[in-house]
Image (cartoon, rainbow, N blue to C red):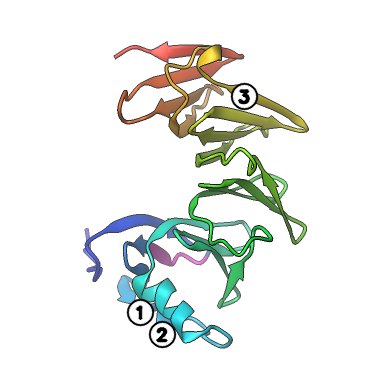
């Protein structure tokens, strides 16, 4: 086991890109591990067209909340102050809405149709065919996690329950459908197709969804 020192003690997330490089999100910017050595981002990123203040935010100051690599090899960087995409060695700011507000990003997911879904503190956004569309922004939906299951449904965890997107159908599960509470923090799918949801850390309950039936896991 080899240890690679990172100059920041607060690690928030970690991913591997399509070429085997490791990217580490911290409370003070983004780091990269190449050939078992920690590299400064300014040594490997094309800075052309990136304002100095923005570059400093990304790689020295900014709290990185989520990292995601899509199938095309792009790296999506979710931060407290917005979303960026690293394409072909260049950092591209993503403007998800017409507002000038910088929207905190919590989670990112790519579906089987290569759409990028982004969960934020201001709702759910989808990037498809070069355009952004928002879902639930008017309700100020706070999204915690997103996954796609084996059948192609998108499961969205929020502070108002969990939501299933299947084709054009939208189904919402809340306490009315048997949840202990509506604040859902995490989600996984098991090999048998069951979906497990983790509720708020205050109660720490786990709920199983199988064949449309909600079951609370005791313990």
Residue 59 on image: x %, y %: 39, 74
- Helix, strand or loop under label 3: strand
**Image point (53%, 20%), residue name:** 174
Q: Which residue is mark 3?
A: 172
- Check disc 1 and report its element: helix, strand or loop: loop
Tags 2 and 1 touching, CB below 8 Å: yes
Where is residue 28? Give x, y as percent. 32, 67
**For residue 33, above or below residue 186:** below
N-term mark: 2 or 3? 2
Kindly report the distance in space between the C-alpha atoms of the residues bearing marks 1 and 3.
Answer: 43 Å
Residue drawn where x is 40% and y is 64% of the image: 22
Closer to the camera in the image, 11 or 113: 11
Residue 175 seen anywhere in this rendered image of the structure: yes
Q: Is residue 151 visible?
A: no
Q: Which residue is mark 1?
A: 40
Along the line of sight, which residue is nearer the eye, 140 or 164?
A: 140
Q: Return the residue nearer the eye: 191 or 27.
A: 27
Q: Quadrant of the C terminus?
A: top left
Q: Earlier in the sequence, mark 1 or mark 3?
A: 1
Name the residue nearer the viewer: 202 or 18.
Answer: 202
The residue singled out by tag 2 in the image is 43
Q: Which residues are magenta?
A: 19-24
Q: Quick check: is 22 in the magenta stretch?
A: yes
Q: Are marks 1 and 3 in contact (CB under 8 Å)?
A: no
């Amino acid at each position: 086991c080899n240890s690679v020192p990172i100059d920041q003690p607060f690690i928030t997330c970690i991913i591997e890109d399509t070429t085997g490089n490791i990217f580490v999100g911290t409370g003070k910017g983004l780091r990269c591990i190449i050939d078992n050595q920690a590299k400064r981002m300014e040594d490997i990123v094309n800075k052309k067209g990136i304002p100095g203040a923005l570059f400093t935010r990304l790689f020295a100051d900014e709290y990185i909340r989520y990292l995601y690599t899509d199938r095309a090899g792009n790296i999506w960087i979710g931060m407290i102050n917005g979303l960026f995409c690293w394409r072909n060695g260049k950092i591209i700011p993503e403007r998800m809405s017409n507002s000038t507000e910088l929207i905190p990003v919590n989670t990112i997911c790519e579906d089987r149709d290569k759409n990028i879904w982004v969960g934020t503190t201001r709702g759910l956004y989808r990037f498809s065919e070069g355009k952004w569309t928002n879902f639930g922004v008017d309700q100020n939906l706070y999204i915690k996690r997103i996954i796609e299951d084996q059948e192609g449904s998108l499961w969205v965890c929020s502070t108002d329950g969990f939501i299933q997107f299947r084709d054009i159908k939208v189904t919402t599960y809340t306490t009315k459908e048997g949840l202990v509470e509506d604040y859902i923090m995490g989600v996984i799918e098991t090999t048998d197709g069951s979906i497990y949801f983790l509720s708020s850390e205050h109660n720490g309950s786990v709920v199983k969804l199988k064949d449309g039936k909600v079951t609370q896991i005791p313990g």
